[in-house]
Amino acid sequence: MKHTYQHIIAVTGFILLAFASCKKEKAAGHNALSPIVISSFEPQIGSGGTEVLISGSNFTSDTSQLSVTINGKKLKIIASNTNQMMVVVPKKVGTGPITVTIGTGNTTSAGVFNYQYTRTVSTLAGSGTAGFANGQGTDAMFDFSSQSWYRTKGIAVDDNLNIYVADVGNHCIRKIDTAGNVTTLAGNPQAGEGYADGKGAAARFSIPYDVAVDAQGNVYSVDPGNYDIRKISPDGTATTWAWANQEPWSVAVDKTTGYIYYCGLHNPGNIYQVTAQWTTNQVVSALNSPAGIAFDKTGNLYASISGDQVIEKFTAGTWQGSVIAGKLGVAGYLNGAATVAQFSNPFGIAVDNNNNIYVAGNGTGYSDNPDESIRFVQAGAFAVSTFAGSGTGGYADGIGGSALFSAPTGVAVDKNGTVYVLDKINNRIRKIVSE
């Protein structure tokens, strides 16, 4: 309410000022030789469609020369004079300072506009009961939890928005198309656990734990039961790509090179690079239980280090590592600045096109973990917040923190920024849309 009243007062003041300064504006205008100054803006928090009143000096009424942005995204200009302007925030602009540009001059606000996303969690597929069934949406069944020790994090999405899931209890790889239809890409649940290359139902898997997709739509899986890395072509043909040096739990594709990477939840645990079939190199060693790995679009590698309770970045090429979020060795559930935030057994990880990081918070796979959410690590400063869910386990679709997950172990993000969650104990695939 405080923000609402301040906004009404600000708008009223702007209207009065616009009339009072009309003649003065014609005489004064913008001085290109003087600095542009932002003294304040109101409100400082809001979502898409929020009107913001910016106050300062040396603005202009010539909107053809005026640009206002947040994070490089333009805001709609409603009106402007030399001392104030009214603008509208677009959707998904994100949190950041306001930049005003007039001609070749510009200035940026000292404070930031805090963008409030509406993050809607829904159920994409899965009935909630462990079992096997193909079908649409909630008619389908997965088995992520019939054995409490299952630790699959396997969920990935391709450029055509098809989703791939490592269905550990059914010993197969599933596919969810854009209409929500769930089919079996490779593996045979009726045949049970095993090992065999082949097409579709002729292929056999043991306990597939993770999947990743390359630029050509090939799916790679890791299977600690078989100790292998498998390549699965779009038609469902599974081929052994490499034997693992350590029991493999996680897999990722660096799309800048096409190379495959895998690691296992070991201490010490290593990250390995597969440059071609049967060609493996060790690139990072002696980590304390690396759980999930993912790449950004420039080839930097990110890992959730479950044993150390942190998120680490490995620079492309050198693989020099640094902790970017979390308190080393301290387990908890706390949001805040990178060095203050706490994780509790972080597991699956994904990176979007803007280098924001998403972390599936429950690496134990049990409902008593302090973190039952998807965490968000903002690009650049690496501040940590809760994207959806909370510290309470359960099942509920809803907005942001009102949604409930039970052992979210895997996370993926598509090219549009939609996030998908492997919700283990609920045996469902969840979908999070941000607006």
Image: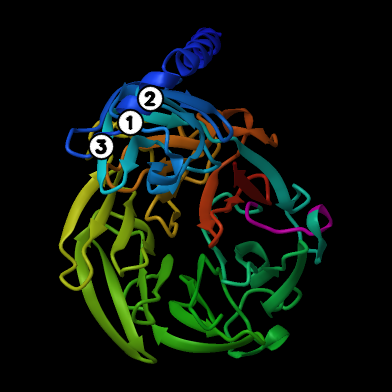
Height in image: 265 above or below 331? below
Q: How many marks?
A: 3
Name the residue that disc number 1 marks: 29
| Disc nearer the start of the sequence (2/3) | 2
Dot 2: what SS? helix
Query: Vertical placement of 311 versus 6: above or below?
Result: below
Where residue 107 is drawn, which disc sits there? 3
Q: Which residue occupies the foreground of this view, 69 or 256?
A: 69
Residue 110 in the figure: left or right of residue 120:
left
Dots 2 and 1: beta carbons under 8 Å? Answer: yes
Q: CA distance from mark 2 to mark 1?
A: 5 Å
Residue 129 in the magenta stretch? The answer is no
Q: Secondary structure at mark 3?
A: strand
Q: Residue at x 72, y 84 (%)?
A: 201
The spot of residue 27 in percent (x, y) is 33, 26
Residue 425 drawn at (x, y percent): 63, 45
Picture quarter with the C terminus: top right
Q: Residue 173: percent from the left, percent from the top?
A: 63, 72
Magenta span main SS = loop
Q: Which mark is residue 25?
A: 2
Quarter of the figure with residue 66: top left
Q: Are marks 2 and 3 in contact (CB under 8 Å)?
A: no
Asked whether, in this view, residue 298 is left or right of residue 285, the answer is right
Q: Quadrant location of residue 237?
A: bottom right
Residue type, numbered disc 2: Glu
As helix, strand or loop, the secondary structure at mark 1 comes to: loop
- In percent of width and height, residue 377 lies at 37, 43
Q: Amino acid at mark 3?
A: Thr
Q: What's the amino acid at mark 1?
A: Gly
Label 1: how many residues lie within 10 Å, few (<14), some (14-19) or many (20+)? some
Magenta stretch: give its range.
138-145
